[in-house]
Amino acid sequence: MADETVVAGTFASRYEAEFARETLHAAGIDSILLADDAGGAYAGLSFTGQARLLVHSSDVMRAKALIGEAGDGSR
């Protein structure tokens, strides 16, 4: 069965999500950043008001713990 992706955290801005993504990357966890800000061209203006980090479902518990330890804006 294929490992599906799930939301590990939502963030108020792309910058917060990128910080969390680098934290996960350093721990060996792959993630996908989804933000509706025209590919970063309008990083301060998110059309949906949030950025999300997706991870493999098998990594979600560890990812959420790491994001919390990093002290970022995850909601």
Image (cartoon, rainbow, N blue to C red):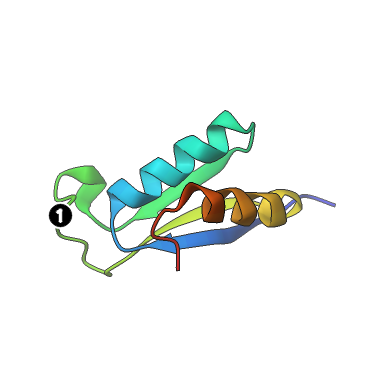
Residue sitting nearer the eye, 15 or 47: 15
Q: Position of residue 18 (x, y in %)?
A: 37, 43
Residue 56 falls left or right of residue 52: right
Secondary element type, mark 1: loop
Residue 24 falls left or right of residue 43: right
Q: Which residue is mark 1?
A: 44
Q: Position of residue 64 (x, y in %)?
A: 61, 56
Which residue is found at the position 45% from the left and 69% from the top? 75
Residue sitting nearer the eye, 38 or 17: 17
Can you name the residue that lies furthest to the right here? 1
Q: Position of residue 32 (x, y in %)?
A: 50, 45
Which residue is found at the position 27% from the left and 69% from the top? 49
Q: Position of residue 8 (x, y in %)?
A: 57, 58
- Please state which amino acid type lies under the numbered disc 1: Gly
Occupied quadrant, residue 50: bottom left
Residue 65 falls left or right of residue 53: right
Label tally: 1
Residue sitting nearer the eye, 9 or 56: 9
How packed is label 1: few (under 14 Cα within 10 Å), some, or many (20 or more)? few
Occupied quadrant, residue 19: top left
